[in-house]
Image (tube, rainbow, N blue to C red):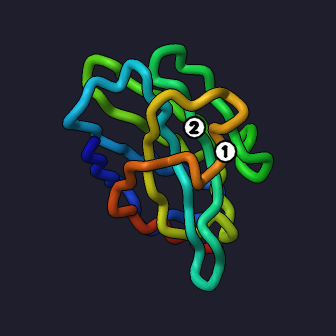
Amino acid sequence: VQLQASGGGLVQAGGSLRLSCAASGRTLSNYAIGWFRQAPGKEREFVAAVKWSTSYPMYADSVKGRFTISRDRAKNTLWLQMSSPKPEDTARYYCASAQGLITSSLPNIDSYKFWGQGTLVTVSS
């Protein structure tokens, strides 16, 4: 699976931004796909993920209620709608996918095999 993330940029705190991840190479019906982020000097962390077939979402507590993950099966595209971002959301955001994950494994970064190159999001205060 090839993943191409885009949509990052500079956004003011309280604004909104939508990230996109275009997937290609394989049918994603048995895949989970999600967003992770890595801030400078910090480890990569889980943001949100969804099972491609069911669209069941899971979120990190830090973004729950502010970010929304969604996918378009026809376009093989994943989105992350960032609403009311905070300066602490500043990071490089990566999309990643893996085959056959159970729900409890969605937040586990080590479960993901395929990674995109990332897109940088900077939230100004």
Residue nearer the viewer, 85 or 43: 43
Label 2 neighbourhood size at 10 Å, few (<14), some (14-19), many (20+)? many
Secondary structure at badge 2 equals: strand
**The C terminus: image quadrant:** bottom right
**Residue at the image position 33 percent from the left and 52 percent from the top:** 5
Residue 75, position as x, y percentages in the image: 25, 25
Q: Hey, what amino acid is under mark 2?
A: Ala
| Residue occupying the far top of the picture | 54
Residue nearer the viewer, 62 or 11: 62
Residue 67, position as x, y percentages in the image: 62, 42
Disc 2 versus disc 1: nearer the observer: 1
Among the 4 quarters of the image, the one containing residue 118: bottom left
* Total numbered labels placed on residues in the image: 2
Among the 4 quarters of the image, the one containing residue 91: bottom right
**Residue at the image position 50 percent from the left and 48 percent from the top:** 112
Position above or below: 60 against 12? above
- Does residue 123 appear in this view? no
Position above or below: 69 against 117? above
Secondary structure at badge 1 equals: loop
Q: Are marks 2 and 1 in contact (CB under 8 Å)?
A: yes
Q: Name the residue under label 1.
A: 107
Residue 63, position as x, y percentages in the image: 71, 48
Going from N to C along the chain, the mark reached first, 2 or 1, is: 2
Q: Mark 2 points at which residue?
A: 49
Q: Residue 19 carries which label?
A: none
Q: Hey, what amino acid is under mark 1?
A: Pro
- Does residue 1 appear in this view? yes
Label 1 neighbourhood size at 10 Å, few (<14), some (14-19), many (20+)? many
Among the 4 quarters of the image, the one containing residue 26: top left
Residue 14, position as x, y percentages in the image: 65, 56
**Residue at the image position 66 percent from the left and 51 percent from the top:** 84
**The N terminus: image quadrant:** top left
